[in-house]
């Protein structure tokens, strides 16, 4: 099967960034954003430093930055999550902020139906007072099973933060879904997750189940060029067990580098199986979609070729020999696994 790719040294890489704008998340309030617009705090790109770039207020910084406070208070901003989720980790990223980062920060969360929670809101401390360092990503685990709607980042007393990542799990209320109508059970908003792949040199596997079509060639999963007889693969977990009716494989923007062929395997696995165990067994799973040809920059829909192998919870997509796929959609009817 080959060895899984070495994932980035990010403790929460297997979780969803609940703060990402493509889920509808937005920074809805900041006490001050004189030097850096609050919206930059959740940009999906990595923060950058640009020499000699200034705006009307001073040095341009790729992040949220408040002015220097001259009173006893502190600054904060509020993020509304596009979808409520259980938070498992926070990353307060001060990269490129060296003489202007906050010495301390806390993170709070709440459940609210308001765009900007009011003064009566009960905020829960999910990251206690944390000493920050310059030019560093600060990863902090969170242990709270509440599905929060808003996040508040408090900085003491002022300064700049490049990015805020809110890693967690989306748990849809499946009782509101029809058991007869197909739903994309792999979609990010429905709890689908990419678990592992053998290569993601040009584009991350976490793009495969993102909302919408890819915006460009970088907004997909793409492997390097193979110089051997092997092939590339990715393993994903569905948000809910389902009978698969249709598979959509989108090669949008991949014109000279799309895979020549694709094949899908699948299995219905117990809820307590670890992700690494699932990945290790994935090359032995049943064939869900036999090997099919792909073309450039197009949506490929497969229905008649999808095998009836019963309820499945996990997928393995094999591409031959290499290349890029923008999105993978798995349309299925919700099901329960046999005891």
Image (tube, helix red, strand yellow):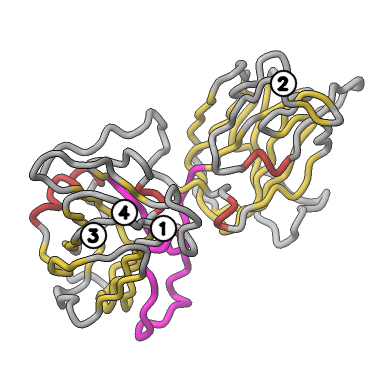
> Measured from the top left, where is residue 306 in percent x and y?
19, 76
The quarter of the image holding the C terminus is bottom left
Dot 2 or dot 1, earlier in sequence: 2
Q: Quadrant of residue 308 in the image?
A: bottom left
Instruction: Specify few, some or many for label 2: CA neighbours under 10 Å numbering under 14, 14-19, or 20 or more.
Output: few
Q: Earlier in the sequence, mark 3 or mark 1?
A: 1
Q: Visible in this render: residue 306?
A: yes
Cα–Cα gap, marks 2 and 4:
38 Å
Residue at 74%, 28% in the rendered image? 60
Q: Secondary structure at mark 4?
A: loop
Q: How many marks?
A: 4
Q: Report the mark closest to the observer, 3 or 2.
A: 2
Q: Quadrant of the N terminus?
A: top left
Q: Badge 4 is on which residue?
A: 256
* CB atoms of marks 3 and 1 within 8 Å: no
CA–CA distance between discs 2 and 1?
A: 34 Å
Which of label 1 and label 4 is nearer to you?
4
> For the residues carrying marks 2 and 4, which lies nearer the camera in this image?
4
Q: Name the residue carrying label 1.
A: 253
Q: Which residue in the rendered view is the most extreme toward the front?
A: 256
Mark 3 lies on residue: 315
User: What residue appears at the point 32 percent right and 47 percent down from the top-left corner?
Assistant: 222
Tell me which segment is drawn in magenta. Answer: 167-196
Residue beneath label 2, please?
52
Residue at screen point 81% across, 52% down = 118
Tell me if label 1 and label 4 are in contact, CB under 8 Å. no
């Amino acid at each position: 099967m080959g060895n899984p790719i070495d994932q980035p040294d990010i403790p929460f890489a297997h979780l969803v960034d609940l703060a990402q704008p493509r889920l509808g998340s937005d920074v809805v309030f900041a006490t001050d954003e004189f030097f850096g617009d609050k919206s930059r705090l959740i940009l999906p790109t990595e923060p950058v430093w640009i020499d000699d770039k200034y705006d009307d207020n001073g040095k341009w910084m790729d992040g949220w930055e408040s002015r220097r406070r001259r009173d006893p208070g502190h600054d904060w901003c509020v993020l509304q999550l596009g979808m409520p989720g259980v938070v498992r980790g926070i990353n307060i990223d001060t990269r490129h902020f060296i003489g202007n980062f906050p010495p301390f920060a806390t993170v709070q969360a709440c459940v609210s139906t308001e765009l900007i929670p009011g003064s009566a809101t009960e905020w829960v401390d999910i990251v206690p007072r944390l000493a920050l360092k310059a030019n560093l990503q600060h990863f902090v685990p969170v242990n709270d099973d509440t599905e929060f709607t808003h996040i508040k980042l408090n900085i003491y007393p002022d300064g700049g933060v490049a990015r805020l990542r809110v890693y967690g799990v989306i748990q849809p209320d499946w009782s509101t879904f029809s058991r007869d109508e197909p739903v994309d059970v792999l979609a990010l908003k429905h709890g689908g997750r990419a678990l592992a792949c053998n290569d993601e040199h040009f584009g991350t596997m976490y793009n495969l189940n993102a909302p919408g079509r890819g915006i460009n060639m970088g907004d997909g999963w793409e492997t390097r060029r193979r110089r051997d007889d092997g092939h590339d693969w990715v393993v994903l977990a569905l948000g809910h067990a389902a009978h698969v009716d249709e598979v959509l494989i989108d090669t949008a923007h991949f014109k000279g580098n799309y895979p020549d062929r694709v094949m899908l395997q699948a299995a219905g696995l117990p809820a307590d199986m670890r992700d690494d165990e699932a990945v290790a067994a994935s090359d032995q799973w049943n064939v869900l979609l036999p090997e099919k040809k792909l073309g450039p920059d197009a949506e490929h829909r497969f229905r008649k070729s999808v095998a009836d192998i019963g309820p499945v919870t996990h997928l393995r997509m094999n591409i031959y020999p290499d290349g890029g796929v923008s999105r993978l959609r798995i349309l299925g009817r919700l099901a329960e696994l046999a005891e």
